[in-house]
């Protein structure tokens, strides 16, 4: 078996220099670093990660706790996290808390016991147990997609966090539909307690106000961020005496549920009811009609979470921060616009 000493001999450097190159523990001259890397490649040297972690107290691993990993949105976030982690020499340990606070607390503890250097978490609607554990054990962490404010909502966030903009893009969907003549625009909102749900409801109400439309609580329903819940919630809307003429779904899973309910009621999109959705996804362009959507920068969110965590590991005392990334309006035809008009517009809804 090739050893670090063999690599040092082949490269003509000390074992300590090889260690610094492989572990990134000290700057090494470029030509020396390249000589070490060439020797590693030529000899087929594989570092003993376990032994190294015992010596350095570093595992070069990150814990990722995200619910609904099968959801295309979170799958793309995972891809962004994985690519950025690999780029910086880190591996991932992944767990799905299923948006259950007790399970969330447990999986975070298990990841911590696996000695991950830090964690990236999409918090549940009730993250008190999560917060208590992370703070008590001083675990470096970044929250993604769902934000958690400080107690009383005053002061900086408890942890670094990154998400997409939610409020203004949702307001833009409302004003777009209102501009097409709709006066009863319904919202299928997400799971109560999530920041994304609250912000998209706020955006919905802002859009109504900007369009001179009243808020009617009867046409705001919760689909609990999943398809089955959205199907039930949409059916409630469709059974109203004065049902909406347009509908906004607040994530991609709920879009599927809403479409099922519309089909069950024999309604066509956009002929009987216009539809816009928050979250674009790979097959949104393949539906008939093609789905008008807000596209989140999901891979960028995942990659940014990794960079924020690495910044935290490098400087534990730096101030916490929240970063929001912009979304893109993807104009297609489910909103009721003709194909040629949808093809001309992309960016901010009018």
Image (spheres, helix red, strand yellow):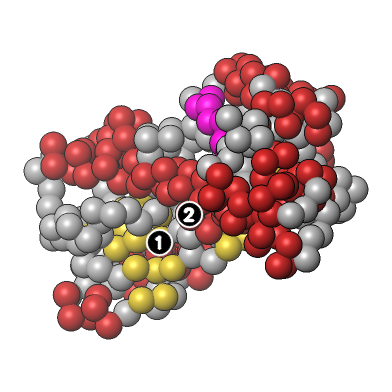
Q: Which residue is mark 2?
A: 298
Of 87 and 111, the residue lying toward us: 87
State whether residue 31 appears in this view: yes
Question: Residue 44 location in percent, x, y?
Answer: 53, 42
Label number found at residue 93: none
Q: Which residue is mark 1?
A: 294
Question: Residue 227 location in percent, x, y?
Answer: 32, 35
Q: Secondary structure at mark 2?
A: helix
Residue displayed at 34% across by 41% down? 253
Q: How many marks?
A: 2
Residue 93 lies in magenta, yes or no?
yes
State whether residue 159 appears in this view: no
Question: Residue 169 location in percent, x, y?
Answer: 48, 64
Q: Main secondary structure of the magenta part?
A: strand
Image quadrant assignment for residue 65: top right
Quadrant where the N terminus is found in the figure: top right
The segment highlighted magenta reads 91-97
Of 136 and 91, the residue lying toward us: 91
Most extreme residue toward the right, as rendered?
A: 317
């Amino acid at each position: 078996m090739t050893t670090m000493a063999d690599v040092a001999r082949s490269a003509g450097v000390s074992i300590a220099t090889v260690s610094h190159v492989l572990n990134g523990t000290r700057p090494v001259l470029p030509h020396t670093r390249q000589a070490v890397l060439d020797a590693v490649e030529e000899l087929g040297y594989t570092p003993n990660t376990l032994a190294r972690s015992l010596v350095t107290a570093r595992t070069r691993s990150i814990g990722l706790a995200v619910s609904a990993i099968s959801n295309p949105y979170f799958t793309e976030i995972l891809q962004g996290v994985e690519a950025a982690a690999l780029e910086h020499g880190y591996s991932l340990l992944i767990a799905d808390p299923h948006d259950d606070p007790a399970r969330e607390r447990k999986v975070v503890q298990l990841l911590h016991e696996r000695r991950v250097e830090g964690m990236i978490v999409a918090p549940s609607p009730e993250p008190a147990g999560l917060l208590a554990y992370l703070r008590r054990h001083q675990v470096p962490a970044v929250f993604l997609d769902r934000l958690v404010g400080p107690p009383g909502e005053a002061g900086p966030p408890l942890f670094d966090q990154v998400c997409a903009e939610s409020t203004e893009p949702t307001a833009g969907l409302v004003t777009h539909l209102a501009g097409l003549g709709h006066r009863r625009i319904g919202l299928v909102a997400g799971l109560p307690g999530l920041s994304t749900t609250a912000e998209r409801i706020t955006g919905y109400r802002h859009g109504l106000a900007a369009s001179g439309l009243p808020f009617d609580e009867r046409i705001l329903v919760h689909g609990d961020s999943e398809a089955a819940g959205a199907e039930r919630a949409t059916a409630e809307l469709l059974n109203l005496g004065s049902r909406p003429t347009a509908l906004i779904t607040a994530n991609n899973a709920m879009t599927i549920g809403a479409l099922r309910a519309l089909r069950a009621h024999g309604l066509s999109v956009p002929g009987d009811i216009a539809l816009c959705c928050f979250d674009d996804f790979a097959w949104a362009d393949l539906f008939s009609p093609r789905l008008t959507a807000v596209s989140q920068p999901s891979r960028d969110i995942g990659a940014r979470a990794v960079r924020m965590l690495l910044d935290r590991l490098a400087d534990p005392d730096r101030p916490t921060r929240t970063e929001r990334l912009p979304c893109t309006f993807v104009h297609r035809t489910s909103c009721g616009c003709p194909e040629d008009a949808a093809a001309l517009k992309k960016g901010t809804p009018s």
